[in-house]
Image (cartoon, grey):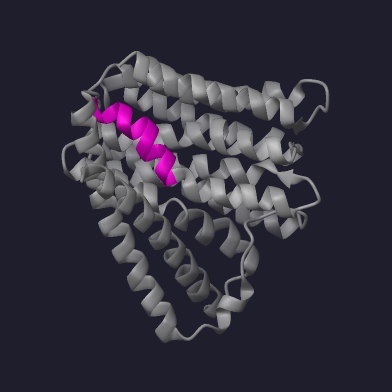
Amino acid sequence: MDYLLLFLGISLLVIGGEFLVRSSVSISLKLNISKMIVGLTVVSFATSVPELFVSIVAAIEGKPDFAIGNVVGSNIANIGLVLGVTAIIHKLSTDRDFNRFYWPIMMLFSIFLYYFLSTEQILSAFEGLMLLVGLVLYLLFLVIRTRTKKDIIVEDVDVSLKSTSYFKVLIWLALGILGLYYGSEWLVSGATGIALDFGVSDRIISLTMVALGTSIPELAASVMAAIKKEKDLSLGNLIGSNIFNIGSVLGITALLHPLALESPKMLSSDLIWMLAFAFILMPLALLIPQRFYINRLKGFILLIGYMVFIFMAFFKS
């Protein structure tokens, strides 16, 4: 039964997330918000909502390590698994925006998260607010840059959604909210039951199975983009979800319900892995051959690193 709940939970999160993205984009376009801003803000936030629902449900049910582990594991999966697999299919470019903007900001958010949790072993409401404010400033800076820099690559936005009827949009929105609500409930319940069956902690399950489940939409979208596109893919859009995960998911969750660490391994191991995966992107990009690209070889390095992380998470538990 737990495995069925896990499967249904992940499925509903994926479906609910898709309906939420469609309805949000349609409403934004109807309000005459530019395609560029919709891609930078609405789509990016909507794709992080599954992680947000899971973390909020976990926090309310008194599982702070589950809530934090979901985001930490998802960020690791985004780089090790999603970027790794995508680079194996098609090399990824690391342009000036990545070197000077996306990577440093991702590192800053990751370091601040580690600092907040290491000081008093808790992510307080005030610290959650700081993360959320940091995300808002990041988005404002992005929007301002789009007015002076026209070659910024953003999330693909289907402009045909603007003509969707309000009735259909409301149906999509309702389906999205229901899917995310019940999906997060069933996912947390199923994952908790599996953790008890295997004798491992909620932390391990959230870092691995749950994080993998909530990263499936990013993996599917990135793989399809790598298969279809002939030109180099931008790395900035792919790692931007890590910034949103920390800023919006943990920021909002902590604001609603402060997150106190239960396991010291979250600090001594899991967050270190997250920082390491975030940091390694820059040295990999500078390595030859093919400097300023994450090519197939470097993709294999990231994927192997992710497999080692999964193995160590279960082995050390």
| Residue 13 image-quadrant placement | bottom left
Q: In the displayed structure, does residue 295 sit left or right of residue 220?
A: right
Residue 246 position, x and y percent, is 43, 39
The residue that appears at 35% across and 27% down in the rendered structure is: 116
Q: Is residue 202 magenta?
A: yes
Residue 270 position, x and y percent, is 39, 22
The residue that appears at 58% across and 40% down in the rendered structure is: 239
Q: Compared to 130, does 49 lie above or below?
A: below
- Asked whether 112 or 309 is in front, the reply is 309
Residue 93 position, x and y percent, is 75, 39
| Residue 112 image-quadrant placement | top left
Q: Compared to 22, does 279 lie above or below?
A: above
Instruction: Residue 20: tell me if it is visible.
Output: yes
Instruction: Residue 256: tell me if it is visible.
Output: no
Instruction: Assign the magenta stretch its main secondary structure.
Output: helix
Number of numbered tags placed on the structure image:
0
Q: Quadrant of the C terminus?
A: top left
Q: In the displayed structure, does residue 129 sit left or right of residue 142?
A: left
The residue that appears at 21% across and 44% down in the rendered structure is: 189
Q: Which residues are magenta?
A: 201-214
Residue 157 position, x and y percent, is 62, 65
The residue that appears at 65% across and 63% down in the rendered structure is: 36
Q: In the displayed structure, does residue 132 sit left or right of residue 289?
A: left
Q: Is residue 127 magenta?
A: no
